[in-house]
Amino acid sequence: MSRVLAPRLVLASASPRRRDLLVRIGLTPDALDSADIDESPLPRELPRVFARRLAVAKAAAVAPRHEGAFVLAGDTVVACGRRVLPKPEDYDAARATLHLLSGRRHRVYTAISAIAPDSRSATRLVLTRVRFKSLSNADIAIYLDSEEWRGKAGGYAIQGLAGAFVIAIDGSSSNVIGLPLYETRALLGGLGYPVDRLLDGEA
């Protein structure tokens, strides 16, 4: 079978988690290029609106640097009610976030935005509901010591130790990690990226 050369795919992120998720479904990015934008929520901005705005802004910031490429961006937001939970910067903030999530359901939104070489664009928003068990002080202390919470939306990484906190997930599990795989593949395919190609002998 002849090999098909696909257009370049650029992931507008420095996240190894998002790259690894793409690789899992055979869509290895040709480059990672993080968008340098202000990621602060606007006053009274709803979590789903915040996630979508950032994903669109990240793709728009990176696309001009990669002419002829497909650019994919994503942003994940963890929310309790109308409240956007932060990426904790210190132990006290991480502890407060875990106490807030303890024994409760929360929502994880990931917005994905892609721009094709001909400047067509598309955006999707994916929601997953997650329920945590009631966390003991020991649970929280052990998790804080693991340092897994650093740089994570909502202060946890479901693919790590925090997976033991999850009682139920309603929706895409990869969405909680940072990239909803079904929707990402469909989004890129809809813009003309050859998601079913064989490249270097791999699907």
Image (cartoon, helix red, strand yellow):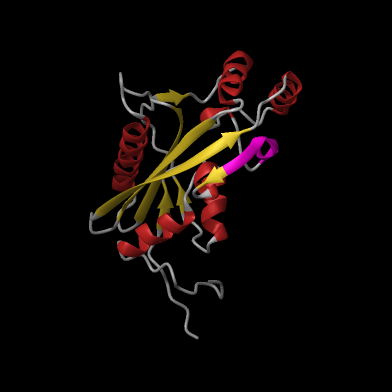
Asked whether residue 77 is in view, the answer is yes
Q: Position of residue 132 (x, y in %)?
A: 61, 33
Looking at the image, residue 16 sits to the left or right of residue 54; the answer is: right
Looking at the image, residue 31 sits to the left or right of residue 138; the answer is: left
| Nearer to the camera, 6 or 151 | 151
Residue drawn at x 31%, y 47% as measured from the top left: 63
Q: Is residue 85 magenta-colored?
A: no
In the figure, residue 33 lies in which quadrant?
top left
Residue drawn at x 52%, y 42% as measured from the top left: 176
Q: Position of residue 156 (x, y in %)?
A: 60, 32
| Nearer to the camera, 73 or 178 | 178
Asked whether residue 14 is in view, the answer is no
Residue drawn at x 35%, y 35% as measured from the top left: 48
Residue drawn at x 50%, y 50% as measured from the top left: 172
| Nearer to the camera, 187 or 72 | 187
- Please provide the residue range marked out in magenta: 160-168
